Image (spheres, rainbow, N blue to C red):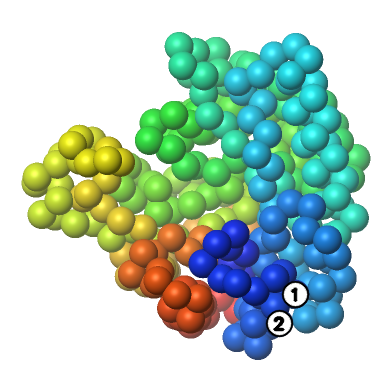
Amino acid sequence: MKIGFIVPRRHVQMDFAGVAAWAAGEGFEALDPPAFTPDAGRIAREHGLTLGCTASGENLLDAEGTQLAERQARVRSALQWAQAEGVAALRLPHRRPAGLSAADAVARFAEALGPVLEEAERVGVDVVVENWPAGGANLVVAPEVWSALLEAVPSPRFGLCIDPSHLVWLGIDEVAATAEFGSRIRYAHAKDTELLEAGCRRYGIYGRQLADKPGGGWWRYRIPGFGAVRWPAFLSALYEAGYDGVLSIEHEDQIFYGSEARFLQGLRIGRRFLQAYVG
């Protein structure tokens, strides 16, 4: 595995070339670039870096007809860009429209993915969905739905982007889930979750209700090593599944927000922690 990180759209002032130079100097081996970053492949190669995964904002679940066709076309264009630049995977959103059952959403998503995956197979780029709940709005959140969707979409170019941080606060065993679905894991995020017992006693599992931004309050995302993820066991499950891709730090640890230097400090600490298990 190679340790990398998602290139932030905020928190740092550097352009992509500057981020790449910093990452290489700190010992990182990979980056997740924003889609359509100019010359991403050339810049990465100049610094000895691999390009892991990029993200598409095109939600194929809440569109039909002409709008869906337009979004599918934009995803295919992103896949072509990824192939040209040497990016290994493309991550898709999966927000479920209000009123659509999970079962119907699985069927709709599987059908919408058809033309996209034909292109993915042609260009050799994986398409992945991350198990991010989005406050309950997303579809591909827990193993129950993973099973249904992966069965409905057997393409070898389609799979999961596993993020253990979400599983921890949802009460899902991150190690068991990784072991069960290891053959369909195509990408991996490295983010931790700290559980706050006092917050859980006050707010319960649904989190704060009176705040400007409801939810949370009894857990928070952290840099790897500062939370409850069982990293040796989680990474062992990835190794056992044969995963040999990028382990990409998704930096959402607000303790290390506030300045560019502090944000980069968080990335540096995360890499040093993971380095004990990745080589």
Q: Which residue has dot 1 on it?
A: 17
Horizontal side, residue 250 vs residue 107: left or right:
left
> Looking at the picture, which amino acid does disc 1 mark?
Ala
Image: 148 above or below 199:
above
Residue at image coords 64%, 82%: 22
- According to the picture, the residue beneath numbered tag 2 turns out to be 21
Q: Nearer the viewer, residue 111 or 217?
A: 217
Residue 61: give x, y in percent of width and height. Answer: 61, 23
Instruction: Locate residue 50, reporting x and y percent.
Output: 75, 69
Q: Which residue is located at x 80 percent, y 35 percent?
A: 74
Residue 248 appears in the figure: no
Figure quadrant of residue 12: bottom right
Which residue is rendered at x = 67% and y = 61% of the image? 32
| Quadrant showing the C terminus | bottom right
- Please say whether residue 11 is visible from this viewpoint: yes
Q: Quadrant of the N terminus?
A: bottom right
Contact flag, marks 2 and 1 (Cβ < 8 Å): yes
Query: How many residues crowd mark 2 within 10 Å: few (<14), some (14–19), many (20+)?
Result: some
Q: Residue at x 15, y 39 (%)?
A: 204
In-image side of 211 versus 57 (left or right): left
- Indicate left or right for 154 with 129 as reference: right
Q: Nearer the viewer, residue 227 or 209?
A: 209
Q: Position of residue 164 (x, y in %)?
A: 43, 53
Q: Please state which of residues 230 and 18 is positioned toward the viewer in this rendering.
A: 18
Q: Quadrant of residue 68?
A: top right
Q: Considering only vertical position in the picture, is 33 above or below 4?
A: above
Cα gap from disc 2 to disc 1, whole angstroms: 6 Å
Q: Amino acid at mark 2?
A: Ala
Between 228 and 7, the one lying in front of the other is 7
| SS for callout 1 | helix
Q: Position of residue 72 (x, y in %)?
A: 78, 28
